[in-house]
């Protein structure tokens, strides 16, 4: 693919990696190309710096196991997924944990904001029984527990920063600190994404070398300026609303394209036909088969 102005800028990002090893020393060693373990032909190098897999387990494998849990990530691995997406927010004592909703009610039965419980309080909750009795006793995992498991499984991650209200920056700061502590030197860097512009700006400032994904619902009119300003490598479209023209436009601009959440085989095939690189799905087993 010829290098356009945008692509050149992203290649320039790679070239500046070695000069910015402040925290990236361990994270970035294998970063250029963002491939690494179990990449092979199942991942595709896009936009110069990010290899996206065709399939990514959403919140682990949310159709088959409780979302954002370790058992869910193991399930995704058992289905052959090499990447998982999950959501990260902070406990009251500032520990990054995997949780989607601001409230703990839906996934633990406790009607309280996640930001109001300490980790030790949250760890007493059952984060699996709501999904099915066989998962009762599963706990809310910390990000660091998750990183350790991912490494053991040889998996890569799309870490979605999902801040509780007012915690857009702190969630980023503490997530980066957790990565510094627990993401091994040999592992490829995770892809960071968020709907929060403040979080993406904080990522850009605090960890410029980590690839960033711009999460959108309806593609905003000013998407190109925003993605450029935030130095994003990928755009993550909402599968329900994205159009073929938007896929073509964002792809032509040189971005890697992911889309969420694709659980229907026919829709999966259509999105791939349009040019989407990566399908984020609750059912990695079903969707992998659909596009095989
Ligand atoms: O990161 C893709 C997708 O997870 C974004 O939406 O609400 O499921 O976190 P949500
Ligand atoms: Mg998410």
Image (cartoon, rainbow, N blue to C red):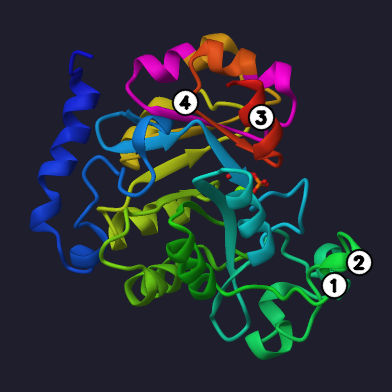
Residue labelled with disc 3: 287
Q: Residue at x 16, y 27 (%)?
A: 8
Residue labelled with disc 4: 277
- Asked whether residue 223 appears in the rendered view, the answer is yes
Q: Secondary structure at mark 3?
A: helix
- Above or below, 214 against 101 in this view is above
Residue 259 x/y as whole percent: 57, 31
Eye-nearest disc, 4 or 1: 1
Q: Which residues are magenta?
A: 248-268
User: How would you rate the neighbour count of disc 3 (Cα within 10 Å): few for under 14, some for 14-19, many for 20 or more?
Assistant: many
Q: Secondary structure at mark 1?
A: loop
- Above or below, 153 against 109 in this view is above
Q: Residue at x 66, y 87 (%)?
A: 118
Is 254 in the magenta?
yes
Give yes or no for contact between labels 2 and 1 (Cβ–Cβ under 8 Å): yes
- Which of these two is toward me, 96 or 172? 96
- Which of these two is toward me, 266 or 162? 266
| Sequence-first tag of 4 and 1 | 1
Residue 136 is labelled as 1
Residue 133 is labelled as 2
- Which of these two is toward me, 6 or 267? 267
| Sequence-first tag of 2 and 3 | 2
- Asked whether residue 162 appears in the rendered view, the answer is no
- Which of these two is toward me, 230 or 189? 189
């Amino acid at each position: 693919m010829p290098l356009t102005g945008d692509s050149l800028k992203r290649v320039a990002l790679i070239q500046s990696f070695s000069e910015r090893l402040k925290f990236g020393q361990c994270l970035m060693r294998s970063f250029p190309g963002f491939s690494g373990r179990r990449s092979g032909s199942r991942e595709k190098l896009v936009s110069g710096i990010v290899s996206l897999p065709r399939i990514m387990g959403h919140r682990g494998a949310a159709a088959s196991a409780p979302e954002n849990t370790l058992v869910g990530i193991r399930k995704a691995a058992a289905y052959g997924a090499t990447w998982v997406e999950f959501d990260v927010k902070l406990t009251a004592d500032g520990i990054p944990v995997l949780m989607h909703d601001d409230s703990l009610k839906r996934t633990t039965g406790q009607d309280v904001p996640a930001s109001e419980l300490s980790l030790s309080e949250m760890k007493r909750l059952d984060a699996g029984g709501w999904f099915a009795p066989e998962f009762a006793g599963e706990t809310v995992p910390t990000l660091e527990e998750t990183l350790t498991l991912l490494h053991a499984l040889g998996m890569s991650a799309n870490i979605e920063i999902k801040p509780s209200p007012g915690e857009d920056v702190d969630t980023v700061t503490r997530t980066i600190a957790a990565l510094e502590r627990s993401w091994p030197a040999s592992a490829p860097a995770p892809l960071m994404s968020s709907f929060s512009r403040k979080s993406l700006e904080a990522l850009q400032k605090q960890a410029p070398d980590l690839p960033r994904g711009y999460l959108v619902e309806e593609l905003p009119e000013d998407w190109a300026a925003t993605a450029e300003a935030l130095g994003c490598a990928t755009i993550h479209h909402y599968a329900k609303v994205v159009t073929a023209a938007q896929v073509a436009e964002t792809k032509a601009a040189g971005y890697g394209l992911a889309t969420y959440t694709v659980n229907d085989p026919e829709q999966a095939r259509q999105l791939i036909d349009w040019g989407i690189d990566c399908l984020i799905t609750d059912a990695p087993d079903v969707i992998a088969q659909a596009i095989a």
